Image: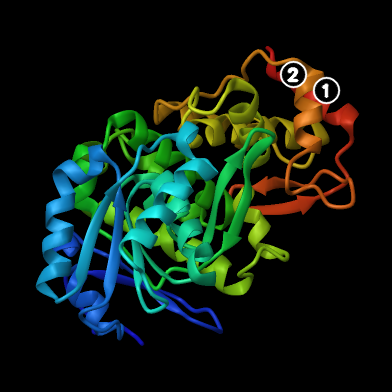
Amino acid sequence: MAIAPNLQHRQIAVALEQDPYEVIIGDGSLETLGDALLRIGIQSGRKILLVSNPDVAGPYGEACLNALQKAGFDVELLLIEAGEDQKTLATVAQIHDAAFAQKLERSSLMLALGGGVVGDMTGFAAATWLRGIGVIQVPTTLLAMVDASIGGKTGVNHPGGKNLIGAFHQPRLVLIDPATLATLPIREFRAGLAEVVKYGVLGDPELFELLEQCPHPDHPEGLGRDRLETILERSAAAKAAVVAADEKEGGLRAILNYGHTFGHVVETLCGYGTWLHGEAVAIGMVAVGELAVQRGSWSRAEAERQQQLIKRMQLPTRWPSLEPDAVLQCLQGDKKVRDGRLRFVMPKTIGAVEIRDDITLEEISRTLEALKV
C-alpha cells in the first residue's frame, strides 16, 4: 500500500514483486512515523517493540515513542548496546527475550531506531521471532540511511567473519529523518560517506562528481541541506533499484559489495570496532581499485580520483599492516566465495563495475605488496 505523498518528503519505491515498500526522506519525518504506519495499513493498537541504544534513544527515543503512541500503537522501548563488537547472537537473544516478555504476536512489529548495527540485529530478531514478524527501519546514521536500512539484509557476526549469520527480511517501511544526523559523531558521518562514494562508482558518475565539486564534503554543513538530501535520495534510489532487480543477491545485487570484500578482511583481522564499517569499506575500495589497476582493467587516473575523494572526506586509504597469508585465508572464508572461487566487484570506470571470479592468489599478493608503498 503506497503512502500518500507529502510535498515536504522525498519518497523512493523499493519495487519488489512481493511486499514492496517505501523509503521516506525528509526533515521532521520522525514526528510523522505513527501516521506513516497507519497509511501503509498497520492497524492502531498493534504491539511494537522499539529497539534502540542509549546514545540514540536519548535525543530521539521520546519523539519516536510519542509519534507511535499518538497514532494508537502499544509501544515498549528496549535499549541494547550498539557497536560492531555487540553484533552477536547474545544481543539478538536480548531482543527475543523482550519480544517474549511483551507477548509480541505475528501481527506485532519490531522497530529499529539507530544505526546499521541496531538495524541489522533488530531485523534478524524480527526475521526469527515467530518465524518472521514485520520490522520498521528508522536509521539515524548516514551509513544506515544510504545502505544498511534498505534491502532486507540482516545478520550478526561470527568469530570467523562478518555477517555470517543472517537472513533476508525486508522492512515494511524505511523512514529517514536527516535531522537525526545533527547528533551523529563526525567520524561516523564520514564513515557513511564511503557508501555514497560506492554508489557513484557503481553506476552514478553524476553523484561522484557532485561530491567532487563540493568544497567541504566531509561534514553535513559543508554539504548543505539540499545537497545532503539529494545524496540521500540518489543513494537510496540506487540501492532500491538493485534490490528490486535482485532481492536475494543471486547476481546483480552482488555489485553492492564493492569495496566490501577487502573491507571485511580489514574488519575481521584488525578486530571488530577497530575501524568503523564505512572506514573499512573506504580502505577496501582503494585496495580493489589497486587490484583493478594491477590487472589493467581500470586506469591509474580514475583510481587516483577515487582515492583523492576518499581522502577529502577524511577517510582512511592506507592498507593496514596485515600478514599476507592471513589476508588470503580470510578472503577464502568470505561468504561471497562460490565453488571455492573468490569473487570481486571490480571497477571498470567511475560509473561502471563488473563481477569477476578469475582473480588469482598471485594477483592479490601482488596487490597487497603494491599497497604497502
Q: Which residue is mark 1?
A: 366
| Numbered disc 1: secondary structure | helix
Is residue 208 shown to the viewer in this render?
no
Vertical placement of 169 versus 226: above or below? below
Q: Are marks 2 and 1 in contact (CB under 8 Å)?
A: yes
Residue 283 seen in the current view? yes
Q: How is the image coloured?
A: rainbow
Left or right: 206, with 78 as reference point: right
Q: Amino acid at mark 2?
A: Ala
Q: Quadrant of the C terminus?
A: top right
- Which residue is found at the position 34% from the left and 68% from the top? 103
Disc number at residue 370?
Answer: 2
In the picture, measured across the screen, residue 211 lies left or right of residue 263, that is left
Residue 211 sits in which quadrant? top left
- Element class at badge 2: helix
Label 2 Cα neighbours within 10 Å, binned few <14 / some 14-19 / many ≥20: some
Q: Tell me the residue at 23%/75% (across/down).
A: 36
Residue at image position (54%, 31%) is: 280
- CA distance separating discs 2 and 1: 6 Å
